[in-house]
Image (tube, grey):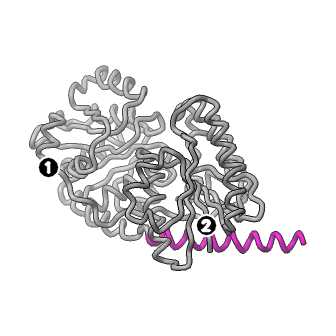
Amino acid sequence: MHVALNWLFMHPRAGGVGTAAREVVPRMLAADPELRLTIMAGAEADDVRDVLPWKDEVTWVRDPVTVTHGPPHNALRTLNTQWVRQPLRARRLGCDVLHGPANSGAVIAPGVASVVTVHDLIWMAYPTAMSPRDRLGTRLTTVAAARAADLVLTDSQASCDVLVERLGLDQERIRVVPLGVEQEPPPAGDAAGVRARLRLGRDEPVLLCVSQKRSHKNLTTLLRALAAVPRADVRLVIPGATTPYEDELRDLAAALGLGDRLVLPDWLAADELEALYETATAVVLPSLEEGFGLPVLDAMVRGAPVACSNRSSLAEVAGDAALLFDPLDPHDIANAIARLLDDEPLRARLVAAGRKRALQYTWERTAQATLASYREARERRKLLRWDRA
């Protein structure tokens, strides 16, 4: 089977979507020795490709399109590439399947089965999560591709329900393919050094929230919860790229009298983030909506107790291995935080349950389910041709 992958979205800071794409490819190759992969990538993927240990096991087709920045006409070039150039190229190369693994893909793919992964539709419920330009582009690419695809993949049952509700998709065309997590995290950096750099006291309890700084992440409610926690020595660390939303967080923290209890570092090196996981008392994730929730599993495999939102896919992924709270109720969040801070046996139980829960989510399973979807899409396309003959 020959599969073409649309990697126009890939760049060094592609986040969870980029992680999923990079982790699944080598495992699909290992699971199916007869699989041929052609990756159609943009200019921004060059730095990612160069460090991939499996880069020589696939065929690369480079397109000069850039997706994350550039003049407005670049968006039209991107659409043309996804809707016209890639499908024609996939057909010319004799591909069986064309897969868009990042919320976009082909609208018309003659002679090739089309698979599109839609990780979430957060932008529809929370418009401020994206700029107007990005929101328009996402609407054009995601909605059209999802409605045209032979199969639509998504990360969780919660996301499947959202696709049916907001796009009116037939559930019969949707396949839930949960993401995975690396079961052996990379080595951590110097935890004491990271604490010192972030000006965290050596013995201060640290709450870690690995999250983009965007409105749907519900970080303002988390700050109100922190203000309601009786202990004044607790620090909340939210690492991630700076966004305009960060100003709102700083203003609210000042209004709540949190002082330096809120720490907002920019992007951290991988070993620094590992060190933060190692030194954190707990991980708290208050998001209102997610497509999956990799930070839940990231915390669990690293032995950090988790408290998270009882909404959307976070609760689905966490199961009974996390302390769940109502993300709209600051006092409920504060109570969950206080329990984790003060109840060491509870933390130990959640750590053990979290490690066990994370074992259910492996990239090998994700790869197997993705391969199965390719085979199914190929057969569906063959049946469609037969019906039209």
Is 236 magenta? The answer is: no
Q: Quadrant of residue 387?
A: bottom right
Disc on the earlier residue, 2 or 1? 2
Q: Amino acid at mark 1?
A: Asp
Point out residue 179 in the picture as x, y percentages from the top left corner.
47, 62
- Residue situated furthest bottom in the rendering: 33
Tell me the number on the disc at residue 3: 2
Closer to us: 386 or 40: 40
Closer to us: 46 or 165: 46
Q: Is residue 159 visible?
A: no
Point out residue 328 in the picture as x, y percentages from the top left corner.
44, 38
Closer to us: 48 or 146: 48
| Residue placed under numbered mark 1 in the picture | 190
Span highlighted in magenta in the image: 364-389
- Which circle, 2 or 1, is nearer the viewer? 2
Q: Quadrant of the C terminus?
A: bottom right
Q: Is residue 333 left or right of residue 56?
A: left
- Circle 2 crowding by C-alpha within 10 Å: few under 14, some 14–19, many from 20: many
Q: Is residue 349 visible?
A: yes
Point out residue 143 in the picture as x, y percentages from the top left corner.
68, 46
Point out residue 79 in the picture as x, y percentages from the top left corner.
67, 42
